[in-house]
Every structure is written in structure tokens, then in C-alpha cells.
Image (cartoon, rainbow, N blue to C red):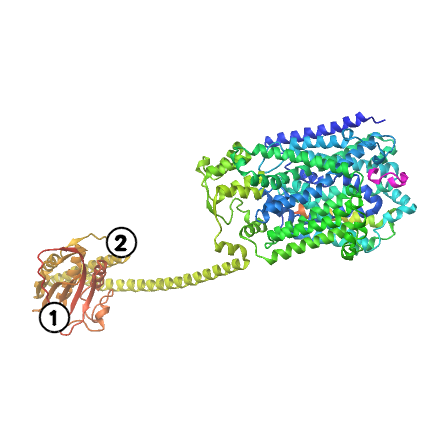
Amino acid sequence: MLRGWVIVAVSFAYLGVLFAIAHWGDRRAEAGRSVIANPWIYSLSLAVYCTTWTFYGSVGRAASSGIGFLPVYLGPTLAAALWWYAMRKIIRISHAYRITSIADFVASRYGKSQLLGGLVTIIAVLGVIPYISLQLKAISGSFAILLHYPEIVMPAQAVAHHAFQDSALYIAMILAAFTILFGTRHLDATERHEGLVAAIAFESVVKLLAFLVVGAFVTFGIYQGFGDIFRKAQEVARLRPLLEVGSAGAGYGTWAFLTVLSMLSVMFLPRQFQIAVVENVDENHLAKAIWLFPLYLLLINVFVLPVALGGLMLFPAGVDADTFVLTVPMSQHRQELALFAFIGGLSAGTGMVIVETIALSTMVCNDLVMPVLLRLRWLRLNERQDVSRLLVNIRRLAITAILLLGYAYFRIAGEAYALVAIGLISFAAVAQFAPAILGGIFWRSGTRAGAMAGLLSGFAVWCYTLLLPSFARSGWLPHSFLEEGPLGIWLLRPHQLFGFTGLDDISHGLFWSMLANCAAYVGVSIARRPGVAEASQASLFVDVLRHTQSPERPPYWRGSASVEDLLALTGRFLGPERAQEAFLALARRRGREAVAELRPDAELVHFAETQLAGAIGGASARVLVSSVVQEEPPGLDEVMDILDEASQVRAYSRQLEQQSRELREATAELRAANARLQELDRLKDDFISNVTHELRTPLTAIRALSEILHDDPRTRLEDRRRFLGVIVKEAERLTRLINQTLDLAKIESGSAEWHTSELDVAEVVREAAEATSQLFRDRGARLSLRLAEGLPRVRADRDRLMQVLVNLLSNAVKFCAPERGLVEIRLAERGAELRVEVQDDGPGVAPPDRETIFERFRQAGETLTGKPRGTGLGLPISRRIVEHFGGRLWLEERAGPGATFCFSLPVASPGRAGATTMVTARGG
Amino acid sequence: MKRSGMTGERLVATFLLGCVLLNYPVLFLFARRVTVAGIPLVYVYLFGVWTLLIAILALVVERKRS
């Protein structure tokens, strides 16, 4: 005999264990040693998908439709295979932008629209609250059945309770307390509840074990294995249809529709989103869940049909198949087993209710209540320094309200069809989110208006084809609504819309609602271009796998903000300490010591916004942040970039073109440089061969004469002296040659030393004349100086200038007429430069040689045959020196005998050397 | 994730395989009044395919971790 107090005590003990696990999980999380940070726990917690609707309901469904219960679990298996692309992306997006609910996700994707967030919340609440009622009903029903042990009495026939004697109310209250305790302990920017997830994973283990034990008991305890049950069932005529798929057509159509429906709902039920996305610790955990979660579903379904068949064979009509999991053990007087089954059902129900309530309360708070509060009572909220407590209290209130609403619906609907059929109807409601979400993460052009139109029309059709008919069947609407259509319009009958027959109600409703939803979403989206905010968010969501390389950088933002404002704002909603901590952590990541050192840039604004988004949802966070930040709308270029993929392609090709042009230019430059190098190489070779040639000439002479002196001791003294004189002269020439070669090399390589100063050129000319006077005397030539007075100074190196003058003078004296030659040197000012002319009366320079004499080792005339009269380096060096001072050196073209070498030097400054008289002198 | 770049494609292929095997008309081929060790063929088939799909998923996901 199972007494009531035993059941209650065991139930409370079970709930106590849950409390303990949740508490332990939270403690571990605070200590930084997360218990849920592994893929096994994650996969188990995903099994919150299996509610009492699975635990008790699957058997009921199997008892009426055979294997028809399976698509609801095959769908998630197939969907799991697609998680790699879809779910991983959703998780990545949600983690990057701190998205904490499905409403927040949709709102954020479509330009942080509060209206969309509110709409999604309303759909979710309307669709899911009856589902919560169903859990309360299942738990209280199973309690009532167990209470009558060993009699098997259906809850409908049980005593009608007064509300305060109703176990469902107390269950709802206990669950509310549990949810508030572990779901809203504090406001976290990530909205994660580690302890809760640990408890949910534990519940998943319990319900699986309970079902497997009951299933194994029925299959192997009452019967002799699977084969035995099926063989015995075959013998019962009324059970035979359960072992077939059903007649082709409708049967397979329903099968496919249910598969699709469950594929969508396993991703978009608020509790699945909460567990799979929001509570996900590491997206890598998803990989193992892809096969572990389907495996869980497989295991929990293996015994469904055997239990259903066993129950149907054991009981006469009148025992609800939904209760077989409990009643079959009871009928065999296995009270421990029945109690365990009850606990399994309790775990399935509580797990669902807790997670669903948290998910809904987050949505209600962030996307329904806060936007309204911020709008209506903005000023009063603004005065508060810390709104975080208010937020937590709103959540708690929402949790209580949701559970009470669930209970109220259970009291009102009771045994009505509206409650019994709600499982799949609820699935169909959340399936309406699919186009907006899946479209939102893969399709760039989905717009806010499109999502709104899609959700509204899908929801409207869902109400009309599924919700209202369920009300009609419960007797809350006239039955003629179903039979004859509203106002007798036959074509609008909600279960045969537009005369469409051949599908069951759920498939029919799903077909029309999804058709309306998708058509409106796509149609409206492509009719109009998205706005700036939408396009920016679309790009963030669709390209999340690219953007999250640097997750804290918002791509398109311009404006100005202050760190204090942002910190204060975040503090109001997260609590000042938490906000301070978060900002400090950010500062540390950026290598700063204090929060004040943070730069108020786009990244900081984005950071604050994501922090807030975690607490109050993306849409509200946007509104709040823009209230303290001056933002400029993105420029036209940015908008165009976002809007047009084509413009990106254009940008790429432009870039490519530019690169190839640069490449071409670089190639040309390289080719020119290479040519120059080759030229230089050739010049160097020429130079070296010239130098060696020039060196060889004096060396040959020295060597020949030295050999004569060495080999022939009888050489006459006179000859010896002459030979030695030649040797000395040639050696001097050699020295000069080497010195000049080095000198030229130095000047050309730029390593020569220059001692530039302002100097009087006339003075240098006089010195040069002095220095070469001996040469003139030796040749019997005369030097005449015609120097203008009071010339401006020039900037030059005195010694180098001297070198040039001496070189020119010695050349002149070399080539002037023998015996009575005349060399004239003139100095005058010409415009902004001084000009020096050195004229001789020699043979002059032949026209072909006029330029070549300035090249290295080139001398006028035939150097090979004629006796060389210089090194061939004097003029090149002189020209380089003059050019270094910014002047020119050239050979004046003029008629008559003699050559005139001129060079000019730029005047340094206005200052003048002496008197201002200017004498212009021209040679004739 | 340190997995082969092919993982996504393999998973989608598994999904498509499952869609084909678990729906009309392939499913119809097994919906006969034939039993395997007393168990209806379609029941054995469905759970067999289900197990197979899970095995493939596990294989694909756990395969490359080098």
C-alpha cells in the first residue's frame, strides 16, 4: 500500500536532490570549476526536449497510431545532422552579441527591433503556456493515479479538487520557487545558470532510467521479449493496424510533416534555445551532442511500442494509454517500480517547466516589459542608480506569473481537447520562428518588415487553423465553426482551409501557416531594400564566422561617447560592481591599468551594448546606449558597401586592378634598375681596363729603364741619370694617376669630404695662378688675370676649387703655343652666378673631342700613339667638383684658335666681397 | 574546431540519407506484413536505420581530431 505521505516524501526528496545538485553546480561555477563544461552534460541537458509528453504521451500516441509517435524523435535526429551549419552559427552569433533568448535573437537580427522582439515573445508565451499546463496536469494526474494504488482510477474519475487541495497548484508553486532560486539568483550578462543545467542533466538521466526500467519490465518481465509482445499483439485484431504505417498518402504525408515540425521545434522551442544556445559553454560541445542527443532519443523510444501494446493487451478499454507507464507496473503490484515511474514523469515535467519558464521570463522581461517601462516611465527609470534589482524582480514576477497562468489554463481547460492536443500545436507555434531565424542567419536580404509580415501571417494562420479549432473542440466556440466554417463560409473551414483535405489537422495547419509565413517573409523582404541598421545586423549575423575573428569590433559605427556615461549606464542595469569589473577586465585586455584610461571608441560602445544586451536584450540595449552616445549614421559609402554585394566585388576587382598596375610599375622600375646596373657594371669594367691600361704605360717605362740599369752595369753615367729622371717622372705620374683615380671614385661614391665655406673666388684664382707660375715659367708662357672687383662670395670647398683651377691652368699651359704662349683667366659675374674662363692660344679641341674630354681616361688626340700629356682624369674630376657646388664646367664653343674652358658657380648670398664696381671682361 | 573541413558536408549527406530512408517511398517498401523474429519488419527497419544514422553521425563527428 502506497500511502500519500510516502509519495509526497519521495517527491520532496527528489526535489531536494535537485536543489542540492543545482546548488553544487552554482558553487562549482563560482569557484571556476564548472561541472557542465563538458559535451556529455550538454547533450544530456538537451534532452529537456523529452517532457511528460514524451514520458507518458509517447505511449499514448503509440497506442492510437502505432509507429506514428516516431517522427517526433526522428526529426530531431535528422535536424542534429544540420546543427553543424545552423546551430553552430546561432551559438556563435548569440555568444558574440550576448543574445539571451529567441526573441532577442530575432529582434537583434532585424535591426534590434523592439517590436519584433515583443511579437516573438507573445507568440512564444501563447504557444508554450498551454504546454506548461500540460506538464502540471501530467504530474498532478500521475500523483492522483498513484494515490489510488493498487486500484487503477483515471484522474478524470477521481475526486474533483478544490483549488487548494489541488496538487498541481503546489507543484506550480514549488517549481516557481526552484526556478526563481536558481534561475534569477543574479543578473548575469551571459544569462547562464550552471547549477540549473546540472540539475536538468540529472533529470534527463532519471527519466531515461525510469522509462528503460519500466519498458524492460514490461518487455522482459511480463512478456518474453520484443518478439513475444508483437506476436501476441498480432493475434488481437484491434491492435493489428498499429503495426503498420497506415494507408499510403495521408499516413506518409503526416509522417513527413511531423518530421519537419519536430526538426524545427527541436531548434526553436524556447527551452531548447535556452539549453542549446544560451547555456552552451563551449560551441565544441555541440559536436558530440550531434550524435549523443539522437542516441538519447533512440533509447527512450525503444520500449514505447512494447509498453503501449502490453498496456492495450493487459487493460480493458477505459484506461488511458497516456498512463500506461505508471499503470502497467501498478497492475502488476510493483509499487517501487510505479513510484520510480512517477519520479521519472516528475523529472520530465519539472525539467521542462523550469527551463521553459526561465526562457519565457527572460523574453517577457527583456522584450515585453522593459521596452514598455523604458518608454512609458523612462524618466523615473533614469533617476534610479541601480536598476539591476528591478530587473531581477521583474524576472521573478514573470516566472510566477507564467507558472500561475499555466496552472490557470490547466484549471480552465482540464480534460478539454485544447490541453490534450497542445503538444504538437505548441510545436507548430514555435515553428513559425524558423523562417525568420534560418533566413536571418543565411540570407542577407531578409528585412525587418519581412520578418514581421512572416511572423504575423504565420501566427495568424496558426491561430486560425490550430488554436481556434482546439477551442471549438473544447466547446468554447460553437462546433459549427469547425463543421461549416465561420459564418457558414464553407471554404474557410479551419481544418479544411480552401477545401484542402487529405492531411491531418496538424499537418494541414503547419502547411498553411508555413506557406503564409515563408511567402510573406520572402515577398516583403525582397520588395524593399533593408535599412542601414538592418543591413548592418544582417551582415554581422550572416557573416558571423568571418566577423568573430575579432568579435569586439563593430564594423560600421561612427560617433562619440564618454567612458563615464557608458560605465554608469551599464552599472545601472548590471549593478555598479559588476559593471566596474567588466570594464576593468576589458581595460586589462587592452593593456590599460584603469577604466579611466579606456578610449571611448566604437569598440567600447559596442562592448557596453553587448553587456547590456545580456541583461535586458539587444533592442533595449540599443535604445539605452544611443541615449548616452552621439551617433552619426553611417556614411553613404558604408551603406552602399553593406547593401551591395556587387559593390564588394567591384571593390575587390578595383583592388586587383590597382595591384596589377602597381606590379607592372614595379616591374618596369626593376627593369630600368637592372639596365642601369648592367650599364654601371659595363662602366666599371671599362674603368678598370682603362685604369690598368693607364697604369701599365708608366709601369712599362719604369720597368724597362730599371732593367737596363740593372742588367747593364756599363751604362754611362749620363744615360743613367737621364733614365733615373724618367723613372722618377713616371713614378710621379703613376702616383698622380692612382691618387686621382681614388679621388674620382670618392667623389662619385659620395664619400669624399667637403669643407664648404663662403669664399672669394678672385682670391682663390690668384692663389692658383701663383701655384702654377713655375709651370708657366718652364714653358715660357704668360698668364694674364682679368678679375672683376667686388664680386659676391660663393659657397665652395677652397681646396677643391683650387684643384679645379690648377687643373684647368695646367691643361692650358700644356696646350698653349710653345715659347710665347698666352693663357688668360677671367672672372666675372653673370646673373646669379660667377663665371671663370680659362683661355689658351693652343691648337684648340677638335669638335669630336669636345664632350669626350670630360669622360674618364679620354684625352684629345690619339692617346695610344701620341705621348700622353696627362692622366685623363683631371677634367672629369673638375667637372664633378664644380657640379657638386651646383655649377657647370664646359668647353666654350668659339671660333679662332685656342680653347676656352669655363665654369660657373652659383652666388651664395647677397653679401659682396669688396667694392661694388663691376668690370665685365671678355676674352677675344 | 579541429575537424576535417569535410565534416559539415558529411553531416549534410547523412541528413539527406536519413531523409530518403525514413520517408515515402523507401519506407513504404518495408511497410509489409513481414516479421523478423516476431517483430514487424517496419519496426526493425526504422530502429535499424535510426541506429545506423547515429553511428554515422558519431563516426563523422568523432573521426578527425588530429
- In the structure shown, which secondary structural element does the residue marked by tag 2 occupy? loop
Residue A189 point in image, percent of width and height: 57, 37
Does residue A77 show up? no
Residue A841 circle label: 1
Tell which subunit mark 2 falls on: A
Q: Is residue A318 magenta?
A: yes
Q: Can you tell which mark lies on residue B15?
A: none
* Residue hosting label 2: A751
Q: CA distance from mark 2 to mark 1?
A: 37 Å
Of residues A122 and A358, the one drawn nearer to the viewer in this rendering: A122
Q: Secondary structure at mark 1?
A: loop
- Mark closer to the chain start, 2 or 1: 2
Label 1: chain? A
Question: Tags 2 and 1 in contact by the CB under 8 Å rule?
Answer: no
Q: Which residues are magenta?
A: A311-324
Give the image location of residue A316, x and y in percent.
90, 39
- Residue A9 appears in which quarter of the rendering? top right
